[in-house]
Structure formats: C-alpha cells, structure tokens
Image (spheres, coloured by chain):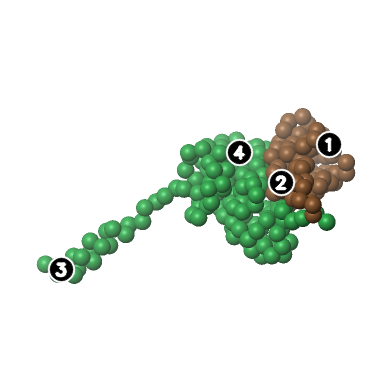
C-alpha cells in the first residue's frame, strides 16, 4: 500500500524534527448504509506506531472519526543517524509498513 | 450601624461565591462524558495548557484538519504522556489517542478528522504527573461526514 513519509534527510543532533505520514486507506466508518439499506461493514486502521532505531517514539489509536487516507504529524528529537519504521494495522488483518532514513550530525 | 438593606445585600453577596468544579466541560452528552471517564477515570480535569487548532466553520465534515499542542517543556521529569481527542455528536465519541514520550521534544500532533454534525471537540492531555488538562472548540459543519448513503 502506498504511504507517503516526510522526514528530513539530515538534522543536527538535538534538533526537534517533524515527521509527517500519509497512507492510503478508505477508513470505512461502519456507520454508512448502501442505497438498499445494508450497513457497510467497518474497515479502518486502528493503530499506528513509529519506531526510531527500534525504540517506539510515537503511537496512535485511530477511530472511525479519522478521515480517509489517515494523515499524522508528530515530533521527535534527532538523536542519532538511523532509521524510522512506521507500521499501520487495522481491521481485517490490515498491516502495512514503511521506513525512512535520517543522518544526524 | 449598618442598615437592614446593607446587611441583606452583604448576606446575598456571600451566597454567590463561585464553587470550583472540576468536571468535563459543561453540556457534555452522556456518551462523550463516558468516553472521557474511560480514559481519565475519576481524576479531576483542569482547563488550560492544551491548544486545539481547528477551523471554526467547516464546509466538508469528511476531512477537517486539526492540530493539538500542549504547553510542556517535554523533559524527563515533565512531559506529556498522551493526548486524547473526543467529539460530541459523531456516532462514536472517540477520535484518536496519541502517545508521546520525553524524546518527542514538542507536544504537538496533527491529523484530519471527520465530523458528522455541528458540535464540540474536546482535547485532553495527560501529563507525566498524571494530571489531566483539557480544551474544547465548537465547530460549525455544513456538510456532514460518516453517515451519508453510498452511491
């Protein structure tokens, strides 16, 4: 699944950096009906996690009130060069990952 | 010697000393209140520290940009543990829970949310000393999200 990640490629040690993520997902609320009156079953991402060189730095529980194609932005302190790993999990066994690298000077 | 009128006005003045209450913000429907209590427990919720940036008038409730920030030094001793966002009139009162750490550096998150109706959004922050702080915002929505029919 397509995910867009925005992490600065380079940062100074101790800088506070912003991480922005966007992933494509319908986020079907489970509260909508078809014209025939049938309830459309819920299909959402329920959890997002970001790890920085293996350590969890941010986590979110998502609910149907999060818009389709969930966008999340948060901050972290650039401590060392390495890798950010992102994971989205949800209904019907949904799971997708992405990663981004950073060089800290 | 005070007159009777002065005495009565003095006595009346005593009775209007405001009582400080630490409940969730006023006029919260039961579902919203329950959802907040599920997170907060019986702890008092104070108003302040939290800032909720959300447009006051929204044309399309399907995607509403929202930023929550908390005034915090984000040090090992004093940081924001989590931010919880609730709504008043969607089919479900929860919007999202966001968990931070001292290494977040800045207590601020942004996302895009759905609003099914003109309503209030409440953001609550849990600090490292387990105190809770809240803010609310009223949003007018002209096109609702969540419950419309599929075509």
Give the color of chain B as drawn: green
Q: Which residue occupies the foreground of this view, A58 or B88?
A: B88
Q: Chain of mark 4?
A: B
Residue under the image location 77 percent in, 43 percent down: A41
Asked whether residue B151 is in view, the answer is yes
Label 2 sits on residue? A64
Q: Which chain is disc 2 placed on?
A: A
Looking at the rendered structure, which numbered label has been put on residue B8? none
Task: Please tell me if label 1 and label 4 are on a single chain.
Answer: no
Quadrant showing the C terminus of chain B: bottom right
Instruction: Kindly identify which numbered label has been placed on residue B4.
Output: 3
Q: Disc 1 and disc 4: Cα gap in Å?
A: 26 Å
- Tell us which disc is closer to us: 2 or 4: 2
Q: Which residue is mark 1?
A: A96
Residue density around tag 4, few if under 14, some if 14–19, many if 20 or more, within 10 Å: some
Q: What percent of the width, then of the height, locates residue B133?
A: 53, 47
Q: Residues within 10 Å of mark 1 (few under 14, many from 20)?
A: some
Do the dots labelled 2 and 1 sit on one chain?
yes
Q: Secondary structure at mark 4?
A: strand
Colour of the chain lettered A: brown
Q: Nearer the viewer, mark 3 or mark 2?
A: 2
Distance between mark 2 and mark 4 Cα atoms: 23 Å
CA–CA distance between discs 2 and 1? 18 Å
Image point (70%, 42%), residue name: A62
Which residue in the protein does label 4 denote? B81
């Amino acid at each position: 699944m397509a995910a867009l990640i925005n992490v600065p490629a380079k940062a100074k040690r101790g800088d506070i950096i912003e991480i922005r993520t966007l992933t494509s997902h319908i986020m079907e609320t489970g509260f909508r009906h078809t014209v025939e009156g049938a309830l459309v079953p819920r299909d959402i991402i329920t959890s997002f996690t970001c790890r920085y060189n293996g350590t969890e730095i941010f986590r979110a529980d998502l609910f149907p009130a999060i818009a389709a194609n969930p966008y999340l932005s948060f901050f972290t302190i650039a401590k060392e060069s390495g890798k950010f790993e992102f994971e989205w999990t949800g209904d019907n066994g949904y799971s997708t990952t992405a990663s981004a690298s950073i060089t800290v000077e | 010697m005070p007159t009777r009128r002065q005495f009565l006005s003095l006595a009346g003045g005593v009775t209007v000393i405001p009582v400080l209450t630490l409940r969730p913000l006023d006029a919260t429907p039961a579902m919203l209140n329950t959802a907040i209590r599920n997170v907060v427990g019986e702890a008092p919720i104070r108003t302040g520290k939290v800032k909720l940036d959300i447009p006051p008038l929204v044309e399309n409730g399907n995607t509403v940009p929202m930023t929550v920030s908390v005034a915090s030094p984000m040090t090992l001793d004093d940081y924001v543990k989590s931010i919880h966002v609730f709504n008043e009139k969607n089919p479900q009162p929860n919007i999202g829970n966001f968990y931070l750490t001292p290494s977040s550096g800045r207590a601020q998150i942004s996302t895009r949310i759905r609003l099914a109706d003109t309503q209030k959004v409440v953001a609550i922050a849990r600090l490292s000393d387990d105190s809770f702080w809240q803010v609310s915002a009223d949003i007018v929505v002209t096109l609702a999200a969540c419950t419309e029919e599929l075509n």
